[in-house]
Amino acid sequence: MPQRAGVPKAGQRRRLALLAVPGPVGRGRHFARQALEDWGWADADTLTDDILLIVSELLANACIHGGGPRELVLTASPEGLRVEVLDHEATLPSPRPPHLTTAPGGHGLHIVARLSERWGADLHPGGKSVWAELGAARLRSREPAGPGVTGSPAGRGSAPAV
């Protein structure tokens, strides 16, 4: 299958420092949209919206549960796209049961799982990273997440399954 235009064979990584930055979710979305445009993946379509929603949810979770995001990392490669948010909290995320009616919120990781092919969390010195991946085939086909696409945590020190 031909490689998607705009993605170098060796891949490319973009980093945005967010430590003590006001409005990290909005800044992260803007940064991600620019990266997607540079890589030829930002059209006015549902897939772009899915990616930006993943960025938003991971950053919002870091704001609420991780003491604020330290960094947003986007990695594009022939294998796909990885969205990663680093924070200072050393506790792995634990998704709430779906449809918990006694408390608002708690849907962020379920949304990430639904829109990505894989997601997980890894512990690092000084905190953790929570990440989501979309495969190259989906990026090339421009298909949004559908009923058959579900995320599953994977990786070293991963969070529990949703």
Image (cartoon, rainbow, N blue to C red):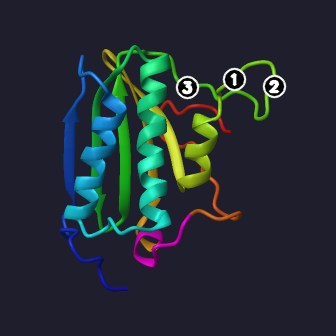
Residue that badge 3 annotates? 93
Q: Where is residue 17 in the image (x, y as percent from the top left)?
A: 20, 30
> Within 10 angstroms of label 1, few (less than 14), some, or many (20 or more) residues?
few
Residue 132 visible in rendering: no
- Which amino acid type corresponds to the residue marked 2 in the rendered image? Thr
Q: How crowded is mark 3: few (under 14 residues within 10 Å), some or many (20 or more)?
A: many
* Residue sitting nearer the eye, 149 or 26: 26
Q: If the image is split into quadrants, where does the C terminus sit?
A: top right
* Left or right relative to 153: residue 42: left
In the rendered structure, which disc, 2 or 3, sits on the residue that comes first in sequence?
A: 3
In the image, residue 10 lies at what x, y percent? 18, 64
Q: Residue 73: x percent and y percent?
A: 28, 41
Q: Which residue is drawn at 45% across and 73% down?
A: 142
Q: Is mark 3 on a helix, strand or loop?
A: loop
Crowdedness near tag 2: few (<14), some (14–19) or many (≥20) residues, C-alpha within 10 Å: few
Circle 1: residue type = Pro
Q: In this view, does 137 lie above or below 36?
A: below
Q: Residue at x 55, y 44 (%)?
A: 112
Per the image, label 2 sits on a secondary structure element best described as loop
**Residue sitting nearer the eye, 134 or 161:** 134
Q: How far apart are marks 1 and 3 (CA)?
A: 17 Å
**Compared to 70, does 113 lie above or below?**
below
Residue 145 image label: none
Q: What stretch is highlighted in magenta?
A: 138-144
Give the residue at mark 2.
Answer: 101
Q: Mark 1 points at which residue?
A: 104
Q: Distance between the residues labelled 1 and 2?
A: 7 Å
Which of the two marks, 2 or 3, is nearer to us in this view?
2
- Per the image, label 1 sits on a secondary structure element best described as loop
